Amino acid sequence: MISHTSSMTDTANFVKEKRIRMGLTQLELAILLGLKENGERTVRGWELAEHKPSKTAISKLLSLSEHTPFKNKNIKPLFTFIDLFAGIGGIRLPFQELGGKCVFSSEWDKFAQITYASNYGDVPKGDITQISTQEIPEHDILIGGFPCQAFSQAGLKKGFEDTRGTMFFEIQRILAEKRPKVFLLENVKQLKGHDKGQTLQTMLRILTGQSDMTGLDDVPMSDDARNALSRKLNYWVDFKVLRAADFGIPQNRERIFIVGFDRDYFGQDIDFSKIFKFPTPTYEKTKLGDILQTQSELDKMIDTYTISDNLWLGHQRRKAEHQNKGNGFGYSLFNSESPYTNTLSARYNKDGSEILIDQSHLGKNPRKLTPRECARLQGFPEDFIIDAVSNAQMYKQFGNSVCVTVIRAIAQEIVRAIKLTETIELAS
């Protein structure tokens, strides 16, 4: 432990030793500390005892965990993969569990980078549009939950007209140049019906190599992405909407998943419709009480998550107004016996309206889910670190994340299909 009155040399040694123990570069440490443009130079200056970090910086340094519960230990991985639009690593985790090694990750949100690094020991690179394909290592599988606001029910559903919607073209840029064997993409289920299905069909035509630039001239995208469109992809592609509640997680979360296998690598003759199948839902009964913290745990922090009188009155007033208009908008109340909740969203911290837990039996207003309950509601393991950032950021991150349980089921089928195709190739 270091005190704020330590000598310049002691401080310099502390910074360097802490960074090395965490396995970080000076730039990565600067990112985690939220330093500005010259952050790498600042950290270098600290380590050379040219100047001392501020009290705030030292406090942040001390708070950075050196224990990363999901650091990749696969020395001889069965496959490699990259994690795009990584968020907090919900898609990464199952692929790592199955023997894969993540060789590159990208996430622009600085708070998500902190949570990701705290759990995996890797600091994701930033904005993928600013990263050249040459900077991305060769890999077997590309995974990515590309931004969904452009297609979501909560957003304006502008699709490719929204800059966030054009992130798909950054994916096709990397697919065109790196040609991974397999990819897995995730988005909101509304993508399936956006623009009467035309948006998804355009994506599928690009991924299967059946599309040219027709109709894409006015779509905003990077020059590299536009140039990559001339390189025809040749993936066998399938998609499906899966629901978390059908896989044992008490959340009515539906997402579309798109899987592709490179025909140029595996061979044109393989019938992937027989090799790969999306996982069959387990349909096991779910109950919200299974993921709620115990009352004794909650008693220590109940006032933190119980909503105020003013907020509760506002919720009730707005719901009554909507009911008078004949629609079902407004807050939703659940209890431990509820089979599942609504979809957890990135705006959950705002007022918790989509998932409020009834506390009338305690004589209290409803409460929001705790961050740990949100983690469970998304299928994250119990040792996933959730306190590297504020509660507000954590709510946003879990709302933007994926249901790990569903991803795990898909990942198992992908790995099984890869092994099966390799068996077929050996036999032939």
Image (cartoon, helix red, strand yellow):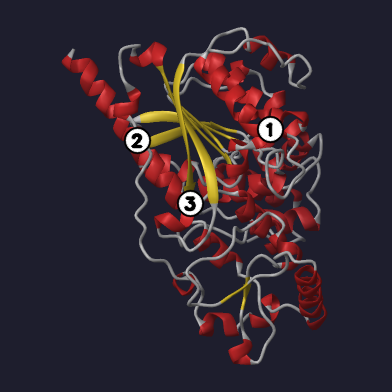
Q: Secondary structure at mark 3?
A: strand
> Marks 3 and 2: in contact by CB < 8 Å?
no
Give the class, few, some or many, for how many residues have Cα within 10 Å of label 2's Cα (few <14, many ≥20): some
Task: Check the picture and name the quadrant holding the N terminus.
Answer: bottom right
Q: Which mark is residue 277?
A: 2
In this rendering, the answer to whether 203 lies above or below 344 is above
The amino acid at mark 1 is Asp
Q: Nearer the viewer, mark 3 or mark 1?
A: 1
Percent from the top left, x then y, of residue 402?
Answer: 54, 48
Q: Which residue is mark 3?
A: 243
Percent from the top left, x then y, of residue 27?
Answer: 68, 35
Q: In the rendered view, does 250 fall on the left or right side of 38?
A: left
* Numbered circles on residues, count: 3
Alpha carbon of mark 2 to alpha carbon of mark 1: how far?
Answer: 27 Å
Alpha carbon of mark 2 to alpha carbon of mark 3: how far?
Answer: 16 Å
Which badge, 2 or 3, comes first in the chain's sequence? Answer: 3
Residue extending farthest to the left is 427
Q: Which residue is mark 1?
A: 195
The residue under the point 76% across, 21% down is 219
> Marks 1 and 3: in contact by CB < 8 Å?
no
The amino acid at mark 3 is Arg
Front residue of 391/151: it is 151
Percent from the top left, x then y, of residue 133?
Answer: 61, 18
The residue under the point 76% across, 31% down is 163
Q: Secondary structure at mark 1?
A: helix
Q: In the rendered view, does 27 fall on the left or right side of 120?
A: right
The residue under the point 54% across, 9% down is 232
The residue under the point 79% across, 40% down is 50
Alpha carbon of mark 3 to alpha carbon of mark 1: how far?
Answer: 22 Å
Q: Nearer the viewer, mark 2 or mark 1?
A: 1
